């Protein structure tokens, strides 16, 4: 009896120790988890600060209004950012209608059969194809096959194909979030499928689709490899022809076929040079590029956050 | 075709409609079919892209293999396609690719998994809601910027730790690439863990298990296929990564197992050739398509397995 009563506190103590030990492991893991997250934070901070310290002194108005030059202190990113804007224009004009239409088809129209299955598997796999492969595709199809040359049009179409899966997936997710009741209500009033899609499905999913488009364009604006592969020149000291002219018909499409450079290519070109003065330029260009992509991604994340908060079906 | 029957053209309602209404009904039916067809074409364009990729890569590679035997391509240990006496052995590029991906995964897999477990099982709602957008932003930074970071920030630091480290090396490129794909791995892992039903955790807690025990012995095993998918898709991502390696790894096709030396990957080779001015249609021009085909097959293989496993965990619960 006495042995048992003296054992009881012992085993309680053992259990308490066991619990304490296990809880300690919990805390240790939380610490490790936070450390891992901090590594990400520190890496990002280091990346941003190193570019800021090296590149910020170069960021003046002149940097944005000068062409690249052999003299690093004279060089700027005028042709690069104009090229990026024009290429993005082509990319958006090609990828948005195509991607949204494909997303609408897959979500609203597609019958359940093997053709649909193939399209779906294909979209998932296209999203995983390395970007440089799209460059090889564009080299074969756009540059030589269709003879578009190393132009803004070729680059814009290449990047459009690259972000097509992003737009399609975002469209589908936005549409899937709309309750079936909305469709049934429209059909009950005698609307056709297309009327339902045009007047209800597309307006209600537009914010979600917009989020996907912005994320896709943010990815496209930073893409370097496929543009290098189609053979974009890295030294461009002129601007493409203006899209608006003083003579009728006032609009010119010559710029589509013009040679060009874009921000990431300009940065790559400067990083690859051994002179430190050019690396300073690379840092400045990188800073502009990072701020641009962060702003676009930030906008998309904010849009999605607002959407989730306001949307109550 | 449609899940909900359109009622105005059924026989019982047709009688009630005016003749003009019927005609309009017919016209709008044609319009409906036309619109559906246009949308179908848009969806088909993605399949067309894949077909075009395969056709271009296979066609140019076929021309290439008529001049270079397949065996010397697959087993040759020297890659000097632009020399006077060219050799076309893909092994140096493959080892470069495998090593850089290996280093990247050594960073991304443990860190991505730990972050995913932390965010899914430990972090409060607020912490998770602020950490996830940050990881997303990190994933959105252009790869050329990571290349700059590897070459001009990480390499000088590594050179202080490892004396005699070459200015261009696989180690620094691989490490930065690892950091780059952490968000990718962690977000797929976390998706998989969040898909595990709450009841399984509650059962575990009810048995007196701690959070860590539940995370490691209940949630992780239940999410295995999703976590494996994250790793596999991470591999595919690392194998296809281009700019970090083109900038920081040195562009020398070395057949070496030493990550401290400069090397070249398949992707970096394609970039370095594209920067030069190779005549269209020569063997040199075709090498990039043969290299690209190799890359495409490797990534397609990983992607197919990865997505199949991902689908499996989605179906499981």
Image (cartoon, helix red, strand yellow):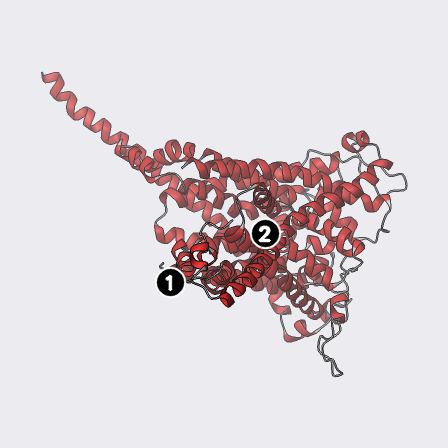
- Callout 1 and callout 2 share a chain: yes
The chain to which mark 2 is attached is A
Which numbered marker is on residue A165? Answer: 2
In the depicted view, which residue is nearer to us: A99 or A241?
A: A99
The chain to which mark 1 is attached is A
Task: Report x, y in % for residue A96.
Answer: 59, 61
The residue singled out by tag 1 in the image is A310
Name the residue: 68% across, 38% down.
Answer: B297
Which numbered marker is on residue A2? Answer: none
- Callout 2: helix, strand or loop? helix
Task: Report x, y in % for residue A59.
Answer: 62, 70
Q: Residues within 10 Å of mark 1 (few under 14, many from 20)?
A: few
Task: Report x, y in % for residue A19.
Answer: 27, 32
- Is A250 drawn above or below residue B316 in the view shown? below
- Is A301 drawn above or below residue A2 in the view shown? below
Q: Earlier in the sequence, mark 1 or mark 2?
A: 2
Residue B267, picture quadrant:
top right
Residue A150, picture quadrant:
bottom right
A259 to the left or right of B314: right
Report the Cα–Cα distance between label 1 and label 2.
Answer: 27 Å
């Amino acid at each position: 009896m006495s042995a048992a009563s003296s054992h009881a506190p012992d085993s309680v103590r053992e259990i308490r120790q066991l619990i304490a030990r296990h809880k300690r492991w919990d805390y240790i893991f939380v610490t490790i988890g936070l450390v891992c997250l901090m590594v990400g934070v520190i890496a990002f901070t280091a990346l941003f600060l190193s570019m800021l310290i090296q590149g910020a002194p170069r960021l003046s108005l002149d940097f944005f209004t000068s062409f690249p030059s052999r003299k690093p202190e004279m060089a700027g990113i005028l042709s690069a950012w104009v090229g990026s804007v024009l290429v993005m224009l082509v990319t958006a004009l090609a990828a948005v209608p195509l991607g949204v239409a494909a997303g609408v088809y897959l979500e609203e129209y597609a019958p359940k059969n093997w053709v649909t299955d193939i399209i779906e598997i294909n979209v998932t796999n296209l999203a995983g194809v390395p970007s440089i492969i799209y460059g090889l595709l564009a080299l074969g199809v756009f540059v030589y096959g269709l003879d578009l040359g190393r132009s803004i049009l070729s680059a814009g179409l290449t990047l459009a194909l690259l972000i097509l899966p992003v737009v399609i997936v975002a469209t589908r997710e936005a549409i899937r979030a709309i309750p079936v009741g909305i469709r049934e209500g429209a059909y009950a009033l005698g609307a056709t499928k297309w009327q339902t899609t045009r007047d209800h499905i597309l307006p209600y999913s537009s914010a979600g689709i917009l989020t996907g488009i912005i994320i896709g364009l943010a990815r496209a604006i930073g893409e370097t490899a496929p543009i290098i592969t189609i053979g974009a020149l890295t030294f461009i000291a002129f601007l493409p022809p203006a899209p608006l002219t003083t003579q009728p018909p006032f609009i010119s499409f010559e710029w589509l076929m013009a040679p060009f450079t874009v921000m990431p290519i300009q940065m790559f070109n400067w990083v690859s040079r051994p002179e430190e003065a050019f690396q300073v330029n690379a840092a400045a260009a990188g800073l502009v590029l990072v701020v641009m992509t962060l702003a676009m991604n930030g906008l998309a994340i904010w849009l999605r956050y607002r959407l989730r908060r306001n949307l109550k079906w | 075709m449609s899940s909900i029957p359109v009622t105005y053209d059924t026989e019982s309602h047709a009688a009630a409609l005016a003749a003009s209404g019927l005609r309009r009904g017919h016209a709008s039916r044609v319009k409906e079919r036309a619109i559906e067809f246009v949308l179908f074409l848009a969806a088909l364009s993605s399949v067309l892209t894949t077909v075009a990729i395969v056709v271009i890569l296979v066609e140019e590679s076929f021309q290439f293999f008529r001049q270079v035997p397949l065996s010397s391509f697959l087993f040759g240990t020297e890659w000097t396609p632009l020399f006077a006496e060219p050799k076309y052995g893909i092994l140096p590029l493959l080892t470069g690719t495998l090593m850089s991906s290996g280093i990247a995964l050594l960073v991304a897999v443990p860190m991505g998994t730990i972050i995913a477990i932390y965010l899914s099982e430990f972090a409060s709602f607020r912490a998770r809601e602020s950490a996830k957008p940050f990881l997303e932003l990190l994933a959105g930074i252009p790869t050329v910027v990571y290349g700059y970071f590897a070459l001009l920030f990480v390499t000088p630091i590594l050179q202080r730790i490892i004396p005699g480290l070459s200015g261009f090396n696989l180690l620094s490129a691989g490490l930065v690439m690892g950091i780059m794909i952490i968000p990718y791995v962690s977000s797929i892992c976390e998706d998989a863990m969040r898909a595990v039903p709450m009841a399984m955790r509650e059962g575990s807690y009810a048995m007196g298990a701690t959070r860590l025990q539940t995370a490691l012995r209940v949630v992780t095993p239940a999410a295995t296929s999703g976590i494996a998918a994250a790793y596999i898709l991470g591999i595919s991502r690392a194998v296809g990564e281009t700019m970090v390696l083109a900038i920081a790894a040195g562009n020398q096709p070395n057949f070496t197992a030493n990550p401290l030396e400069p090397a070249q990957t398949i992707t970096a080779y394609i970039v370095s050739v594209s920067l030069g001015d190779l005549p269209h249609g020569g063997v040199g021009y075709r090498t990039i398509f043969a290299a690209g085909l190799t890359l495409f097959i490797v990534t397609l293989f990983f992607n197919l397995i990865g997505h199949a496993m991902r689908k499996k965990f989605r179906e499981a619960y």
